[in-house]
Image (spheres, grey):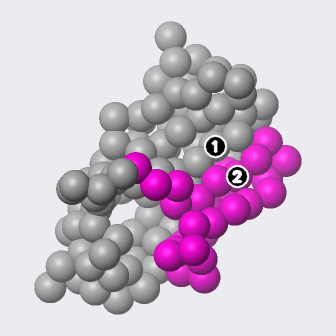
Amino acid sequence: QVQLVESGGGLVQPGGSLRLSCVASGITFSFYAMAWYRQAPGKQRELVASISSGSSTNYGDSVRGRFIISRDNAEKTVYLQMNSLKPEDTAVYYCNARVGRAYWGQGTQVTVSS
């Protein structure tokens, strides 16, 4: 049974930082491309950042230079370091694992507000 469990969300002031974590089980983690997506109310889900099995990274235009994605294959965990947060970063953040088919976590809420 595949599980992706996100953590680290919360309320943060504009300009602050948060670090999201996603722990995977039930998959051979090192084989999988991992990604973070987000969905704000009334908007489509969008790609935030992705990291390949070989640790090549890709970022959405709105977060490039502020967010960093990384992975620890030994811990079966993917991270998203979010810096210089803006109110428009407010969304539910989802972890995604993909080799052919995709798996999703339940999401973690990030709210950026003063």
Residue 22 relative to residue 100: left or right: left
Q: For the residue labelled by badge 2, is the local secondary structure a helix, a strand or a loop?
A: strand
Taking depth in this image into account, of 74 and 12 the one nearest to the observer is 12
Residue that lies at the very extreme toward the right in this rendered image: 54
Residue 87 in sight from this viewpoint? yes
**Callout 1, which amino acid?**
Met
The label number, if any, that marks residue 58 in the structure image: none
Q: Earlier in the sequence, mark 2 or mark 1?
A: 1
Q: Residue at x 50, y 76 (%)?
A: 62
Residue 106 placed where, x, y %? 34, 35
The residue labelled by disc 1 is 34
Q: Is residue 65 magenta?
A: yes
| Secondary structure found at label 1 | strand
Q: Are marks 2 and 1 in contact (CB under 8 Å)?
A: yes
**In-image side of 90 versus 65 (left or right):** left
Assess disc 1: are there few (<14), some (14-19) or many (≥20) residues with their C-alpha within 10 Å of its C-alpha: many
| Structural distance between the alpha carbons of marks 2 and 1 | 5 Å
In the image, residue 70 above or below residue 77: below
| Rendering quarter of residue 11 | bottom left
Rendering quarter of residue 60:
bottom right
Q: Where does the magenta region start and end?
A: 45-71
Determine whether 107 is above or below 105 in the image: below
Q: Which mark is residue 51?
A: 2
Q: Is residue 80 above or below residue 15?
A: above
The mark total stands at: 2
